[in-house]
Structure formats: C-alpha cells, structure tokens
Image: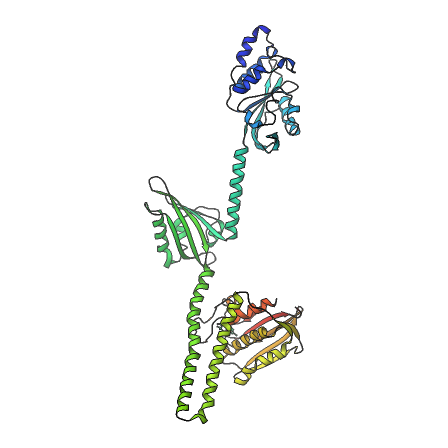
Amino acid sequence: MLQSKSDTSINNAYLAGGGEMGQLIRSYDWQNSAIGAPDKWSQSLLTTISIILNSKFPMFLWWGPQLIQFYNDAYRPSLGNNGKHPTALGQPGEECWPEIWTVIKPLIDQVMTGQEATWSEDQLIPIYRNNALEDVYWTFGYSRVNDETGKPAGVLVICNETTDKVKAYNEIHRANKELEFAIEAAELGTWDLDPKTNVFMGNDRLKTWFGLPHDEKIDLEKATNVVVEKDRERVIAAIFNAVQNGSDGNYNIIYTIQSPVDNIPRIVKAIGKALFDSDGNAYRLSGILQDVTDEFQLQQRKDEFISVASHELKTPITSLKASMQILQKLIKEDQTSIKLPLFVDKANNNVGKLTNLLDDLMSVSKVQNGQLILNKTWINLANLINGCCDHVRLAGTHEIILKGNTELMVCADYVRIDQVIVNLVNNAVKYAPHSKEIIINIGLSNGMALVSVKDFGIGISPEKMPHLFDRYYRVDTSGVQFSGLGLGLYISAEIIKRHNGQIWVESELGKGATFYFTLPIEQ
Ligand code: ADP
C-alpha cells in the first residue's frame, strides 16, 4: 500500500534518528531517484529503513529493481575513506560495486527469486576504499524483504566486517606455523601439564620418545614411569617444586628415559615454566624437551679422552725418562759401548710413539678447524701401501699380504692417505695380537679405487660398529687391553670424506675386521 503526501510526518518518524546516515537519508534528493520521494515509499521500505537506522549492527539494503542502496552508521566504517561513501547511498547496486558485482549479484538473485537466505562467514570480498582495492572479509547474510503484496522487493544485508579478526587469526596461524617449524627444525619435544589434574599433553615427537599413544592425553604417572628408575624420584621432585605455591616456577632438568616401545635410552633435557593464578596456585607447567644423548655422550667421551690421552702420553714419557736415566748412568760409568745403542733405540722408539700421538692430536684440531688442506698428486696405491707398512714388516709380528691391482693410480694427498693406511694397519696389528696375517687388497668398484685392510683379530660387535668413526670413540674405554686415543678412525674418515670417498667396516666379533675405503681415481 502506498502512502499519500499527507503522511509525510509519519514518514519522517520512520526516517528519524540513525546518526550520520539518518541525516544523509533525510536530506537526500530522492525525488530524482528511481524510487522517488519518501512519501511514495511503501510501508515495507519505511519499516526496513527504520530498523536499519535504529540498529547498532551493520546493515545494508538494496531496494527495488535497480537495487537502490541504504546503509546505517554501523556499516559506514567498512566503506573506508575516499571510497564509496557517501555516493553509495541511493546509488544502484551495480554502479556501486563493479569490482565484486559478479560475486554478489548471484546471491542477490538467489534471495530476490524467493530462494533461501544466504549465509557466508569470513568471506573475502575485496572492495575499493581508502584509495585502493582492499582485501575485506565479511560475515554476512542476505535476506529477502517483501513488499505489501508479498513479492520480493529488496535484499537486507546483515553483516559484520571481520577483516581484523581474520587478519589476527591469520597472524596467529602464521606465528603458530613458524613456531611449529622451529620446533620441528630443532627436533624438540613439547609438553604441557595441568598440575591440578596431572593430565599431560605432548607433541608427537615427545610421545614417540616416551613410547606413549599419540592420540591420547596422558596421565603424568604414565610419563614418569618411562623415566629410568635412578632418575624418576628426582624428576617427580623437580615437577613438584616447580608448581609449588611460592616457587619461581622454573623447571630445568636432565634425565634419561627408556621407551617401552623401542627400548632406546635417551638422555633428555627438559626446560619449562609454571604459570600461577592470583592465589599463587599453579595452573600450568609447560615447556620443551631436547634429546641431548649425543652431546652428553660426546662430553663423556671427551672426559674419558682427557684421562686416556694423559695416560697414553705418560707411558712413553716415563719410558723415555727411564732410558735417559740409564743412558746417563752408562755414560757416567763409562759403559757406553755395549748397552748404549739399545737404550738410544728405546728412547727413539718412545719419541716416535709421542710424535704419533701428537700428530693425531694435531690432525684432530686441523679437521675441526677446517684446516685439513689436501695436496693432491698422482699416487701408485701399491707403492704407498708398501712404503707405509715397513714398520710392521720390521717388527716381524705380522705378515702384510698385498693383493689386487698394484698398478692402480689415484690422484690424492700422499701424506694423508699414508696416514689412513698406517692407522688401519696399526689397528689391524693392535687388535689382532694372536693372528699373523693382514691382507690388503687394491681394486676397483663403481669407477672408484677400493682399498681393504683385513685382519683376523678380536673383531667388533654389531652395536659398536656405527660409532667407530666418531671422535674419541673406543670400544674398550678402560684402555686396559689396548691402548689408544679413539682418534685414528675419526681422522681417517675425515681424510677420506675430504677426498670424496667413503669408509666403512665389516666385522664379526671374534673373527676379525675388514676396513674399506674408496677414493675417486681422478679428482
Ligand atoms: P684407537 O686409538 O682406540 O685405536 P681408533 O679410532 O683407531 O682409535 O679406533 C676406534 C676403536 O675402534 C678402537 O678403540 C677399537 O675398539 C676399534 N677398532 C679399530 N680397529 C679395529 C680392528 N681392526 N679390530 C677391532 N676393533 C677395532
């Protein structure tokens, strides 16, 4: 039903209020618009505008076949500055929204043709505002407004701009991803304990280390049961102390766990912090877990190394000192002729041992400081091997049998490859005290020179083999049976790696060992 001119005051009542937009709507020149002056407006339009103007929730209306636009103060900020406001008021929809018309027109049509109202959440609809096409996110619904005859006459948009929310969410998501990436790259476990319920959560890595199911929250006791017995009480006490009322909340502890699944002992370092409420009660204890097994073992080996190295250096020095004292005595007593050469030999021998030990120590620091510089020349491998085995032949304890391709030449650093072979041959002598033969073979494999040194000595158990080439590693750490620094194979491996070759071992405990290395023929 259309209203007559005499109803102007009623119309004014419908268009009352509404802040800036109410003012603009009232002063707009509707007479020259497609929907005419307000006194011609239908009751339905007036009621809808009244609802819009009196709402604090952002609302927008398209009315009539031209989709003439109205919106309220709550909606207005979404149009930004230097953009569509205030021209959007009274403007036909298609003129106002060219940049998104293809997206929104189907929704308008859906509603105007009597189909269901629409609902979109946090949808990206870029609009032109603030002098630019901006990415704007909206949660909105389009609903039909009928005229008095019950026919669709307009589309009411109740909407909320969610750009800030979506951006904040994206930012949190990005920060979380970054954190996840850092945790992943640092190979950390993460954990979070509720001290009130003792329910424990952790990331997958932590659950794998503890051998706990991945898809469950875990009771703290289940986790502490995985801590090895000697450390368990200490860990429980540290947790208890961190969450105690009045504590500084710090939790920092190293302990060993042994998962019931893989049975691998892992030394872990846990760092955490408790959070307290205003009454001083802890409501959360969370932090990270780091697998420090390798560092710990390396440190342990370093400590052992220092005692082994002192012992190894002391033996030849003591022996050297004794030889010198005897020589001094012999010279004093003028008995030089018979025994002098014997003790000079002994002294020389011990100086040789000291030189070898110091060479190894110096090579290690060179390797670590990246100063292992290779000086490559063409070398006949058989000649090199023969040359560096003379000391063994002279000692007469072992027989070196050289087989294979004695013509093979490689381009490598003579001094360094000599050092590798001397290390391997000396080990073959040292760790095979009761057998006589050492077989060295020179061959070709996949276009590389392949050298093997085989002995028939004590061999190596399978679980020790992966560590042989580690720094300071010794199978017999006590050094009771065999002396050594645990450096020879580490240095050899580094030298071979620097030549782009490979080094490995095959062995059976009690049956001897064969060490292999490859070298590219041409570098
Ligand atoms: P080391 O000075 O202790 O001999 P290496 O680095 O040369 O140091 O060797 C590391 C460890 O590997 C040795 O302590 C020894 O236990 C083991 N090993 C090396 N060569 C042999 C071998 N031929 N037979 C058995 N065990 C060996």
Q: Quadrant of residue 84?
A: top right
* Vertical side of 265 occupied by 127: above or below: above
Q: Position of residue 258 (x, y in %)?
A: 43, 58
Q: Position of residue 522 (x, y in %)?
A: 67, 69
Residue 396 in view (yes/no): no
* Vertical side of 177 occupied by 517: above or below: below
Front residue of this view, candidates 108 and 82: 82
* Vertical side of 155 occupied by 384: above or below: below
Apparent side of residue 443 relative to residue 304 in the rendered image (left or right): right
Q: Position of residue 301 (x, y in %)?
A: 45, 66
Position of the C terminus by quadrant: bottom right
Position of the N terminus by quadrant: top right
Q: Quadrant of residue 126?
A: top right
Asked which colour scheme the image uses, the reply is rainbow
Residue at screen point 44% across, 72% down: 309
Q: Which residue is most to the top?
A: 6
* Vertical side of 287 occupied by 84: above or below: above
Apparent side of residue 259 relative to residue 28 in the rendered image (left or right): left
Residue at screen point 52% across, 65% down: 368
Residue 306 in view (yes/no): yes
